[in-house]
Image (tube, rainbow, N blue to C red):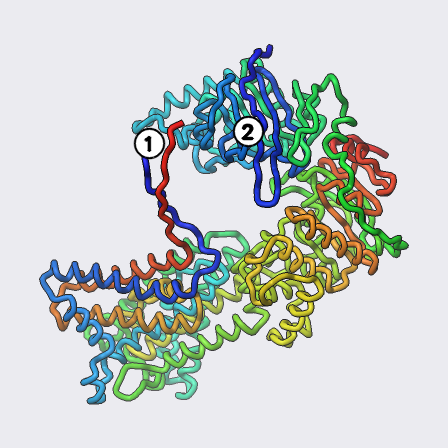
Amino acid sequence: MTDAVPLVQMRGITKRFPGVVANDRIDFDVRAGEVHALLGENGAGKSTLMNVLAGLYRPDAGEILLHGQPCVLRSPSDAIARGIGMVHQHFMLVQVQTVAENIILGLNRPRFFLNLNRLEQEIAQLAGQYHLPVHPRAYIWQLSVGEQQRVEILKMLYRGAEVLILDEPTAVLTPQEAERLFETLASLTKQGKAIIFITHKLEEVFAIADRITVLRDGRVVGSTTPAETNERDLASMMVGREVLFHIEKKAVPPGEVVLEVQDLHALSDRGLPALKGVSFSVRRGEILGIAGVAGNGQRELAEVLTGLRKATGGHVRILGQEMTNCPAREVIQCKVSHVPGDRLGEGLVSNLPVDDNQILKDYRQPPLARGPFLVESAIARLAEKLIAAFDIDTPSPKTLVRLLSGGNQQKVLLARELHVAPNLLVAVHPTRGLDVGATEFVHQRLLEQRAEGTAILLISEDLDEVLTLSDRVAVLYEGEIMGLLPAAEAEIATVGLMMAGKRME
Amino acid sequence: MKDWLDVKFEKRLVPSPVITAVVPFVSLGLALVLGAILLLLAGVNPLTTYGAMLQGAFGSPEQWLKGDFYNLSETLVKAIPLMLCGLGVGIAFRMLFWNIGAEGQLAAGGIAAAGVALFWGTALPAPLVLPTMIGVGFAAGAMWGLIPSLLKAFLQVNEIITTLMLNYIAILLVEYLFYGPWKDPQGYGFPGTAEFVEAAWLPRLPDSRVHLGLLFAVLVALFIWLVLSRTKWGYEIRVIGENPRAARYAGIGLVRNIILVMILSGGLAGLAGMSEVAGIAHRLQKGLTVGYGYTAIIVAWLARLGPWRTLLVAFLLAALLVGGDQIQITMKLPAAIALIIQGLILFCMLGGDLFTHYRLRVQIRRRVVG
């Protein structure tokens, strides 16, 4: 079913960003009628490579051949004109317009008069041809996420896409919706389309891919087919690198139970079950790592524990005290610190100065406040102290947080959350987007906090980080814990399998 | 090959202090030049006209030497409601609560204060009349602001719509009252209530209409400045205004703050209404709701929500309004010309603000056909 000449060939693609080589001499191709899975951890360079193919980035070196002919893709519209369409993880749809209106959005035709009836017929026909049932007159806001994704795919097909790039298309779908997507993809390839499927879920690769290419640290580490490999091998190809730096981890005897979570249930923003009966406990001086692919309930877990999301069932106890569904303020008063995953969006007020950010959690109490007033001198003292203690590189305590580097922003946040000697620390992706130096600093601080007797729940997508820092590791998959084991006994391949949904008891 | 100009706005990382200082003057200059073209077309000398505007708003040195501060005092009179309403909407805007209902809140305050003066003016001991009017006027404005804030806090109803709609209700209620039930029986059919007893008049500066409301405005600005820079509450308002998600994360109560801030915001507009009826008209009549509440939105924005700047901007805007009125009289210019000049100045000032946050970049790009 595959042609001799690949539809798309990428040769020696190199793309550098300041300080990193996102793609390092990558070769990649896709033929008509096949699904080529692009597998790799976050930051492995998958999205960069595909953004090059979709015309969003220009490669620093290398060439792209379409039907064997070299070509330069200047922009996304240039790429789509040549038959390459990308469906992004976050949909680019106008909620208040209909399916048909969204599909023609940005097109140069029709030039002036809009014959919506004819257009709707065309779309309905296209939808029928590729088994993408959506009603052309439905408004986007009426559609489920799965249907919206179909609209995105239709949008690309209507523009004549021969190659479809799907960036982690199942990340936002329910299992049933994912199943339907796979059926659609099968019918697309049957009709000669080429599909590039970006993912880090192993089972999906085996469900639909004809070929697999694995990226790690911007390089191709292997190309194979589902028949020639197995989940275990793929997992180690994907994540199985040596730990970059080794951290001195002192033995700390775990103390009393600080956090106890029992049969916890919660819904996601979309109202779907995000946590389905999660139970675990964390003791003083212990780091419990929660591994897993993002979107499997990690954010919801952190939010329920910190009072930012309602639990729909189960219990959260802190030092034996029932804290289920307590407001955030009471949780803070129980000395529960929270390093949220979205640092700038949630954990910091980027348009306020460093000192205002340092007092965000305890501006209510003395010595920072006296009656209704804030005590300027105490705030200044605290800010100076934290800037020194956490080595925050800022021109002054009055500098706006948004002007600091990512690493220093995270230090501002950590300083605030750690200086209160918390009973419990919930840290979500604490090193995401940080450079090696800042990452090491954060790791060091987490271990120090552990030595001081804080119970730490470390939620991270970075497996190395979880395995190096944690005493015990649990893996979240679709809102359930796939297994809980001592970090010392956790093999990367085993954890990788659990991340892909294999239960280990 | 084809060259083209690539023009784009780039956001500045930090607004440059020099630009921030210079932009208002350049904007004003541009507005005056555009206005001059218009005035030339209308067949009058632009310089004389602008001179007349200045004189109308502030008076002239000769007048000052003679102890005549009439024009300046009229500008201050107009500035008072703009100051109070501007401070009110400014504090709500700080928290991203888009209160565009100052006009209605002002009307509510005016009605309530007038009610006190008309019905209890003689019953209350004289020294208590004004304080009661202040309290009731503030409370009525606060109530008018409270309705949309409760709807927003508990039902997520868009406050832009509710505050705007409540304006019409309050404005028409004022008219209904002075045309109807509260109309002065001895007023020879003139629409308006009876004049208040003197105990209900706000004290004025000698030989002018400048009343005690000016002191209210200054005290309120001081209060807001203190709240914002020195108190826990002000800190919460700043955090919510800059990042509501972070506020939630820190356990700051959004509902509580929306309600409190709108009580203050509406109350200040209510105070403006009270001081208008008690300081200027001494009765409820046409002329209470002439758009101060709307102009206050522009005042708050131009002042970048700073309380002291709000006082200054309100004064300058009042000068623009009074100056515009004056050239209709002294230069015999049609009202439309005065309004166009006012509009040009505001348009350029607000438009120029863009350049404090963005810089314009023009590049010549060369298209390579490949």
| Location of residue A75 in the rendering, given as x and y in whole percent from the top left corner | 45, 32
Q: Amino acid at mark 2?
A: Gly
Where does label 1 land, which residue? B1
In the depicted structure, whether residue A58 falls above or below residue B231: above
Q: CA distance from mark 2 to mark 1?
A: 25 Å
Q: Chain of mark 2?
A: A
What number is the disc on residue A62?
2
| Location of residue B242 in the rendering, given as x and y in whole percent from the top left corner | 53, 59
Question: Quick check: can you spot residue A372?
Answer: no
Q: Residues within 10 Å of mark 2 (few under 14, many from 20)?
A: some
Residue positioned 70% across, 43% down in the render: A298
In the depicted structure, whether residue B301 falls above or below residue A18: below
> Residue B176 lies in what quarter of the image?
bottom left
Quadrant of the drawing holding the C terminus of chain A = top right
What number is the disc on residue A449?
none
Question: Farthest residue toward the right?
Answer: A253
> Residue B175 lies in what quarter of the image?
bottom left
Question: Quick check: can you spot residue B121?
Answer: yes
In the depicted structure, whether residue A374 falls above or below residue A315: below
Residue positioned 22% across, 74% down in the render: B54
